[in-house]
Image: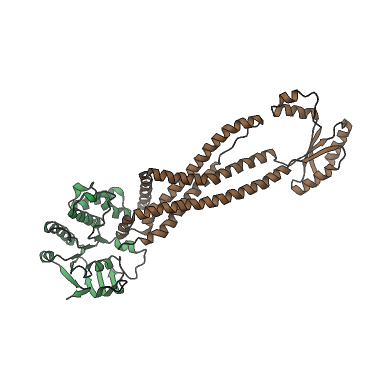
Amino acid sequence: MIKFNQVYKRYPGGHEALRNLSFEIAEGEMVFLTGHSGAGKSTLLKLIAAIERPTSGSVVVKGQNIKSLKGGALPYLRRNLGLIFQDHKLLFDRNAFDNVMLPLQICGFDHRESAKRVRAALDKVGLLNREKANPIALSGGEQQRLCIARAIVNRPTILLADEPTGNLDTEYSGEIMNIFRSFHQVGVTLLVSTHDETILRQFPGRALALKHGELQP
Amino acid sequence: MKSATIQHVQVIRFTLQRLLHTPVASLLNILVIGIALSLPVGGYVLLKNVQGLAEQTAGTPQISVFLAAGTSQEEITRISKELKEHAAIDHIEFVPRDLALKQLQLSTGLADVVGGLTQNPLPDAFVIYPVALDAPKLELLRDDLRSWPRFEHVQLDSAWAHKLQAILRFGRLAVLILAAMLSFALVAITFNTIRLQILTQRDEIEVAKLIGATNGFIRRPFLYFGLVQGLLGGATAWLIIACSLLLLNYNLAELAQLYASNFSLHHLTPGDSLALLGFSAYLGWLGAWLSVSQHLWQIEPK
């Protein structure tokens, strides 16, 4: 599903974020990405979503090489991915329902069909009763769950989550990890970055440990 | 196909909502575009009207020949015969002085003045319709007729029409230059409006790109906005001209009555009106397109 081969990422200015990364994630796998902040976790996720391009080496997602991906094909690759951001990236000019609706609008779904899907997604993350609320009125945990609802409403085959439990207390992060586990059970490939050791102990799954941009054995 | 149509309908609804969301700004923008467009289009309308008047008055060029006073009936018959045989003349019309006076009485509302005359001051006249209609040949014929005896005054009636045509050509060019400059202004106005919109919607554009929006999807609402704004601007220009013509015609009616004419200014033809709306919508779209291509690539998710 996701394949890295000798990937290097160097930012302008000389900072080397990733060094010689090679790994593979199979379809339906649930993988944790660990390491301290600055270890390169976010960069790695950005490479998969083609937000950044590798300096050298190859990143292949669903059979497509990110480096040689044409601009026109990029949106269609991203529609297979559910992205969950640490800073949520919610839009505050519309309510929760419309935020989750956005990916379906982009794909051109019929309005009634998408309304059903949006409610299903909100239900899944336990926000069905908050659909009219503006995201700014939601708590940090609710905002994170809303971001998850938006990521899954399009039924992506791969979910990428960047520190989804970063700013949350244990109770909330447990809830969110349970949501992820339910996706794992229906066959979604998951890559979750975290620096929370307790999560790793609670949940089964392979862990990729990053340190200074290199994969630890 | 179906989902594409739905998307377009959604975008149009969204565009109208956005226009209504900032009513004052939208209204001012549309008004500015309308006024800018109404200047050249108004000029065009006036030119069309003057041109119509000129064609109505001087449809075919004719030469009026006024005979010297005291020309006898036999002489008139002889001249009439000679004129009819002239190769450059198609046909002629004789206007006796009594008839001319009657016509004057009827047509210009000068009945009082004419009635006060003790004797008829008008000469007998021929109206000559030439075969050739181009200016040099007409002038040649006029000069020929001037050399005839008993012809007091020979007047080529189309001369002023030619001059008017030249003035109209000049006017058309002026309107065209004005139109080109103000079209550019319209594009610039839309360009700037869209630029501001893009800047305020930075977050939305970034998120949309992250969750798989194509460039076309992101561009579409802005293009529609430019299109609708241009269209409404064009409609405003049409209304401005319509109101101006109503006002002008109201005042013109009095003036025209004095000249015993029922001349009034006409608005754009339906075809021209559609062309105006289409053109203004296109310019709005163009301004938006230029703005979007200029600014959208600068917003990339980080």
Which hue is chain A drawn in? green
State the image quarter where residue A195 is shown. bottom left
Q: Which chain is brown?
A: B
Q: Would you say B193 lies left or right of A212 here?
A: right
The location of residue B121, given as percent across then percent down, is 80, 29
A138, B224: nearer the viewer: A138
The location of residue B298, given as percent across then percent down, is 37, 61
A105, B225: nearer the viewer: B225
The location of residue B137, given as percent across then percent down, is 78, 48
How many callouts does the rendering have? 0
Please, which colouring scheme is shown?
by chain
Q: Would you say A140 lies left or right of B226 here?
A: left
> In the displayed structure, would residue A87 be above or below residue B228?
below
Which residue is located at x 28 percent, y 47 percent? A112
Q: Would you say B115 lies left or right of A99 here?
A: right
Which residue is located at x 25 percent, y 60 percent? A82
Q: Would you say B255 lies left or right of B100 here?
A: left
State the image quarter where residue B94 is shown. top right
State the image quarter where residue B116 is shown. top right
**Which residue in the rendered view is the most extreme toward the front?**
A13
Which residue is located at x 55 percent, y 37 percent? B245
The location of residue A105, given as percent across then percent down, is 31, 53
> In the displayed structure, would residue B6 be above or below residue B49?
below
Q: Confirm whether residue B86 shows in the render.
A: no
Quadrant (top left, top right, bottom left, bottom right) of the N terminus of chain A: bottom left
Q: Confirm whether residue B130 shows in the render.
A: yes
Quadrant (top left, top right, bottom left, bottom right) of the C terminus of chain A: bottom left
